[in-house]
Image (cartoon, helix red, strand yellow):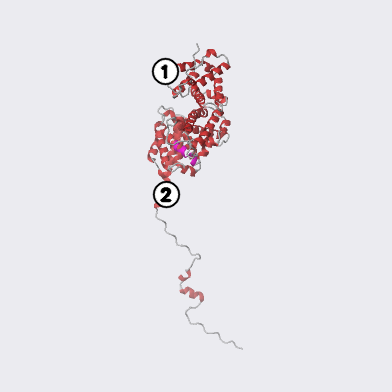
Amino acid sequence: MALKPPYSPESGGASRSRTQTETVHFWEYLESLLDAADCTSEAQVNSALVAYVKTASERYGEYLVEDRDFYRVALLLLRAPLYERNKSFCISKMLSLLSIDLLEMSMKFVISYILLCECKADSSSLDHVLDYQGFTVIYNKLYEHFAYLHRYSDDEETTFEANITELDEEINEELRKISTVLLDLLFQILKYSKCELANLQRVDDFFVYYMMVSLRSDTVEDMYNNAKFRLLLALNEQYMISNHKAGLENKVYAYLMNHTASKQFVELLLLQFNRTVDKSLQIMMCKIIYLILTSRDEIAMDYFYLNDLHVVTDVLIRNLTNISEDEEVLRNTFLRILDLILRKTEWTQSHYREQELLELLEYLCSVDNLCSSGNVKSEHMSTTKLAFKCRQAIRQLKVEQKKSRDAAAAPAPRPKTPEPRFERTDSHMSVPMDKITRAIGRSPFASPPPPPPSRRV
């Protein structure tokens, strides 16, 4: 026998708390909507799916309050035979519903949450999402939310200070909540599926700009903040890949070079780099740092404050020391960043933890220290080469600085007497007088000769 719908808000007393009996009845009724025996055609599947999503959305904030409630809604659908037999159709239908302009925010959230759970449970579902223009649908919804929040919230420090009412803030909070799920869904697409160039070209300047300037750098607990940060990392990675194929402008890098726009992002980057243990995120953050440090020399030298540079050095030393043998690729990534820091930043003046770095690099230069099993792989050889390169960079810097100190301590050379323009020769002063006398036939000191006789006429 079909169950009756649960308590309806329209019948009065919507704000009262639900009894255990009412809660049980709600979940039983919701599950009954997915009865596969009643769905033998695509139209019936469509009706059942819409009824399920609609019923769950109507009880948003009533029976569905905590994250576990929404997860249960998603799990009931994803494990239902009706859904498993018609997965592709159900995904296309939910994307179609999500694309509706005036869709209620509760339904937006429920659909987005179900799609995210599906894609995390089965990464092949990302292909279905992309096949049905999922990237465009998700991107457009996020763009709408960002445009609204840019105008009517205080997410940005530069936002015009409007009179934000309590109702406005409630709307903003709901938009952030939905956007958090959509951002995570878009991250899954960029990170774990083949991103078409056309989809990447769809991302415009405002989309990247808003995510960067609206970040908060004082927390790693805010889910909405973290979702924006992760998506920026994933976008940068896709831009780096596409740059080799199509030369597409990296919008993330463009705003990184704008210190006003990137200030919050860089501060959060350093905070996350110091705290995160997620290996894939560590690599994506290293790619951002790599882009910065391979810019023009004057940019790389002055981009990070010296204290921030010391934090990065601390993290690299810690991670290089603690990485296990099976994570050699990650160690290689850290060594590439360290090499750039040793050569292209203010570390060349500070020499922060120089001796510890030399000892660590000396240890990493030996393959025996990296591979206890004796099964030496190419990654181990790369580690030793990179460690040797970093060690040489430090040693070369020490040699150059010693030369500079020696040159500064050496006495200044005495100035040379300028040579005369014409050389004076006094060699004739040393010739004996008798030789001069013989040369002229008479002494120059003798009396003058008598005058010649008069000529006769």
Residue closer to the observer: 356 or 40: 40
Q: Residue furthest front?
A: 12
Residue type at tag 1? Gln
Which residue in the structure is indicated by mark 1? Answer: 20
Which residue in the structure is indicated by mark 2? Answer: 404
- State the extent of the magenta-drawn residues as a range: 260-269
Magenta span has 438? Answer: no
Magenta span has 263? Answer: yes
Can residue 165 be seen here? The reply is yes
Quadrant in the rendering for residue 432: bottom left
Residue at the image point whose x is 46% and y is 37% from the top: 337
Position above or below: 88 against 161? above
Residue 327, horizontal then vertical, whole percent? 44, 29
Q: Say the numbered circle drawn on residue 205.
A: none
- Our reading of the magenta stretch's main secondary structure is helix
Mark 2 Cα-neighbour bin, 10 Å: few <14, some 14–19, many ≥20: few
Ranked by sequence position, the earlier of labels 1 and 2 is 1
Residue 295, horizontal then vertical, whole percent? 50, 41
Quadrant for the C terminus, please: bottom right
Q: How many marks?
A: 2
Can residue 250 be seen here? The reply is no
Q: CA distance from mark 1 to mark 2?
A: 80 Å
Q: Residue furthest right?
A: 457
Tag 1's secondary structure? Answer: helix
In the image: residue 196, left or right of residue 22: right
